[in-house]
Amino acid sequence: MKDDLSVRMILSVFEKVQKHGEHKDERHELEGITGFTDHDGYTVFLEGFNVKLRTGFHNTYHLDYDSERAFGSFAQKLKYIDENYD
């Protein structure tokens, strides 16, 4: 399942969350996924379903989650947003 995530897809989902999501403070939320950046905008964060994803330089990302089930729900939602929003 982790192989289903690509940096291209992660950044695409982040942009869609920013465009279509509800703005709350410095974050946007769409379909249970919250997206935000650090203070300089170089690091992108997506969170939801008890999963935290951080994307940085050099096409890398880091995931933090407690269960495979949580990660599966998170990954499915990212794929859904990527495929169903413009």
Image: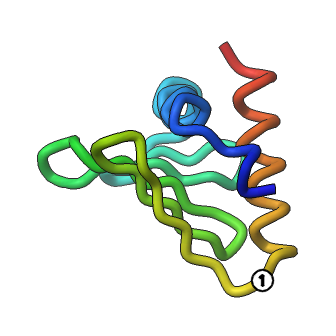
Give the farthest residue toward the bottom: 66
Q: Where is residue 75 in the image (x, y as percent from the top left)?
A: 76, 53
Q: Identify the residue shown where x is 81% and y is 35%.
A: 80
Q: Identify the residue shown where x is 66% and y is 13%.
A: 86
Front residue of 51/1: it is 1
Front residue of 74/2: it is 2
Tell me the kind of residue under disc 1.
Ser
Q: How crowded is mark 1: few (under 14 residues within 10 Å), some or many (20 or more)?
A: few
Tell me if residue 21 can be seen: no
Q: Identify the residue shown where x is 78% and y is 47%.
A: 77
Q: Is residue 68 toward the left or the right of residue 2 in the image? A: right
Q: Where is residue 52 in the image (x, y as percent from the top left)?
A: 54, 68
Q: Is residue 24 toward the left or the right of residue 53 in the image? A: left
Give the farthest residue toward the left: 40
Label 1 sits on a secondary structure element that is loop
Give the farthest residue toward the top: 86
Question: Is 41 drawn above or below residue 1 in the view shown?
Answer: above
Tell me if residue 24 can be seen: yes
The residue identified by callout 1 is 67
